[in-house]
Amino acid sequence: MLISISLKLIFGLLGLLIVVRLIGKKSLSNITPFDLVYTLVLGGILEESIYDDKVNIGHLLFALTLWASMIYFIERVVQKNDRINQLLKGEPSILIKNGTLNLKELSRNHIEMEQLRTMLRQQQCFSVENARHVVLENAGQISLVKESDEDKVMSIMVVDEGMIQDRVLQTHDLERAWLMEQLERKGYHSLEDILYAEWSEEKGFYIVTNDDVLNRTYRIDG
């Protein structure tokens, strides 16, 4: 029993190493969701085989060989065919272009505004206003071009898709009545017209209306 488990672990480790070599010399941040499926399925094969006496070394070797061959074949195909590559591994999505939000791509990738703000903060960009170009890469990270590298102002989101963020206001000791009054002064009489609004003590309001975005017929769904 122990010998069988040991052999399965050894061959499983060798199989994982082979898969890593087939994927290529990528950093973890550059592994696509499709690459992740490779390793998850392989891990599942190994997990199921270790403690199942009905699965012998021959079965494990056959499964590993077949899976590795499929991976190699698919990788070779996607390298030679751009259309299949885009179909299986996807392509980068432009979330912000020239400072303008792209609602179609945000919706297609199921990214809410707060999630977008989190991504930006991880890249040392603390305001949507300061993001000039944002591209969501296949591996899930973003590429960012900022309006200014010196702008470190921290903003808060006060309106998201026409909805006032009451919890955010409470956290920062701000009142709903104050926000409505400020928006009225700036000429925004209906919250439905506002897609996104952020505020900071240093710079005040940055407001995006439904007419200020690309593909404005789309809405952001979480």
Image (cartoon, rainbow, N blue to C red):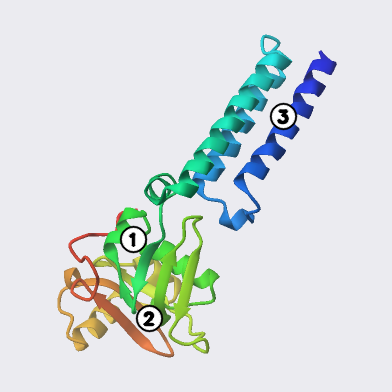
Q: What residue does disc 3 label?
A: 12
Query: Which numbered disc flags the more N-terminal residue, 1 or 2?
Result: 1
Q: Which is more toward the observer, 6 or 68? A: 68
Question: Residue at image x 42%, y 82%?
Answer: 130
Q: Residue furthest top?
A: 54
Mark 2 lies on a secondary structure that is helix
**Residue 221 pos. (x, y %):** 30, 54
Question: Residue at image x 79%, y 28%?
Answer: 10
- Separation of residues labelled 1 and 2 (CA atoms): 16 Å
- Separation of residues labelled 1 and 3 (CA atoms): 39 Å
Q: Are marks 1 and 2 in contact (CB under 8 Å)?
A: no
Q: What residue does disc 1 label?
A: 106
Direction from residue 120 to residue 28 in the image, left or right:
right
Quadrant in which the N terminus appears: top right
Q: What residue does disc 2 label?
A: 129
Query: Which numbered disc flags the more N-terminal residue, 1 or 3?
Result: 3
Kind of residue at badge 1:
Leu
116 in relation to 126, above or below: above
**Residue 161 pos. (x, y %):** 26, 65
Q: Which is more toward the observer, 140 or 122? A: 140
Q: Label 2 crowding class (10 Å Cα cut-off): few <14, some 14-19, many 20+?
A: some
Query: Which numbered disc flags the more N-terminal residue, 2 or 3?
Result: 3
The part of the image, by quadrant, that contains residue 7 is top right
Direction from residue 151 to residue 214 in the image, left or right:
left
Direction from residue 48 to residue 137 in the image, left or right:
left
Question: Residue at image x 51%, y 72%?
Answer: 121
Q: Label 3 crowding class (10 Å Cα cut-off): few <14, some 14-19, many 20+?
A: many
199 in relation to 134, above or below: below
Question: Residue at image x 78%, y 20%?
Answer: 5
